[in-house]
Image: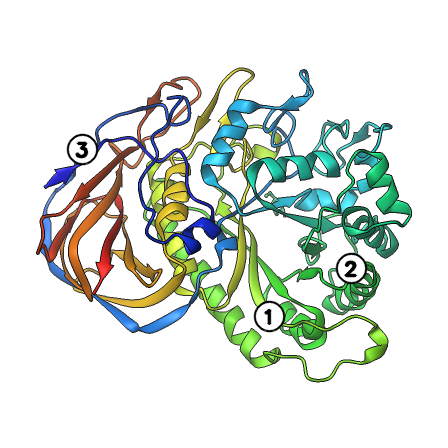
Amino acid sequence: MASSTTTLPATQPTPTDRMQQPSRRKFLKNSTGLLLGAMVPGPVKHFWRAPAATLTVHLNQPLGEISPLIYGQFIEHLGRAIYGGIYDDRKHRFRPDVLEKVRGLRPPLLRYPGGTVTKIYHWKDGVGKHRPVRKNLIWGGLDNNHVGTDEFMQYCQQLGAAPFLTVNMSTGTAEEAAEWVEYCNGMGTYYATQRQKNGHAAPYQVQYWGLGNEEAAREDAGTLQNPQDYIKKAWYYAKLMKLQDPSIKLIMVGDKPDWNQQILQELHPICDYLSLHLYASSKPGDPASLFTSIAAMEASIKVTAAQIKAYAPATVETFSKWYRFPPRQQPVKIAIDEWGIWEAGGRGAYNLEMDYTWNHALGVAAFLNVFQRHAAVIGLATWAQTVNVLAPIMTDDTTSICQTIYYPLALYRKLCGPTSVAVTLAGAEQLDVAASTDGKTLTLAIVQPSAQGVDIRLDAPTTGSWTAHELTAPSLESMNTLQTPGTNVVSYQQRTLPPGTTTYTVAGHSIVLLQAALR
Ligand code: AHR
């Protein structure tokens, strides 16, 4: 059995690379040693062995194309997410150590500026020379607006990520939102010229625009809690924004099924994506309850998928030419534009700075399996958030670390294929599995949230040897912390199984991506 190094991949191909070069599958070693910290070999836990289970891949049952955009990230003007997180306000620059770690996630999409802060955010405060200091009325503290639209675009460019902006439907106006589209995407007109004067000649071509954020929330500083109010205002915003740039894609706010039904019924001709926010959590002292919570999220995706089928035709047949812009061109998809794990007892602003354990990392992998199973209807997803707030990356003034959850986020992005295929598992109910392919390689994603090792018989149309990419940690409670930045509790191992191997043992509390060439 060939066994390789225990370093984690520091650099992943972009989703485009992955689709164009499906056979490039070599890990690149971390050149600085900083990104991943010291690795410790992970113990393989076999408390008791369950009887062999059978995993069967149904290659003739594709479940849909996995959008590369499901691996997006989200940053908000909230606490230490931007100032003290991605940006060093004393040095007036993006923190290079943090940028390097965010790059390791290779996000294809970055959502900004909120979140709830969208409801009080005015984009004109964040461009040009005059940057007013404002109270962050939503999350507390001050926003000096040193990071605004142009800086955000620069960050996206440095990451190779497409920008995704959310517009203010509460204290803002439709005209202000349309002017933002003009600033970002226009040429020759007033706000486009302002962008040029600010040093950015070429349009940013921002495609993804969220109309508001969680508008149903009564506690927030919005007024659109009645879905019909949202619908009326969303039409107005969409018209003005689309008249600036008819090619933009709109993400409409979703909520509970009743809200979603009304949105789909009324807005479907212009709704490219319906948004869902999915935050899983566990009950105190019951790590397994995290997976019950994730199962509930999967149930809500299923309900929303069924609603999209029922209320939104795949194509828009009638649309008045007097709108002066085209209707939606593709079937409505779900935008999971906030997803993550939100536990009680964090630190910082609104207790949103979380310590993520290895159990949470197992949860992230299970969540990503959910996205693969529902690939047909999920158009994009952005993990909430990126640095310090509900985040895979944590910082203090001088140091930054990757939390446990960083590693499944990075590994799935690197290895999973672009097409989801059906897979069934008999005899091991506790395991979570998903399968994907690029037409040449099959990738099985397996999560074992329980302690026992399980022997799995692999019934798959593959040839040659399997390669196993295994992530483990010493215990469910293991964490990476800023106090011990040189220690990484997460262990990665890549092993090539002997030719002809058809049974694989999944270790307890582990995440495994198994790959083999298709026959
Ligand atoms: O991600 C933190 C907050 O969670 C966002 O601002 C809001 O949209 C959600 O409720």
Alpha-carbon neighbours of circle 1 within 10 Å: few (<14), some, or many (≥20)? many
Residue, disc 2: 245
User: Is the N terminus in the top left, top right, bottom left or bottom right quadrant?
Assistant: top left
| Crowd class of label 2 (few under 14; some 14 to 19; many from 20; radius 10 Å) | many
Amino acid type, callout 3: Pro
**Discs 1/3, front:** 1
Q: Earlier in the sequence, mark 2 or mark 1?
A: 2
Closest to the observer, 215 or 326: 326
Q: Is residue 198 left or right of residue 140?
A: right
Observer able to see residue 345: no
Q: Position of residue 402 (x, y in %)?
A: 43, 30
The disc, 2 or 3, on the residue closer to the chain's N-terminal end is 3
Label for residue 332? Answer: 1
> What element does badge 1 sit on?
loop
The amino acid pointed to by label 2 is Asp
* Dot 1 amino acid type: Val
User: Label 3: which residue?
Assistant: 43
Residue 32: give x, y in percent of width and height.
Answer: 40, 21
Q: Secondary structure at mark 2?
A: loop
Q: What is the crowding at mark 3: few (fewer than 14 residues within 10 Å), some, or many (at least 20)?
A: few
The answer to whether residue 229 of the structure is visible from this angle is yes
Q: Does 282 sit left or right of 61 as displayed?
A: right
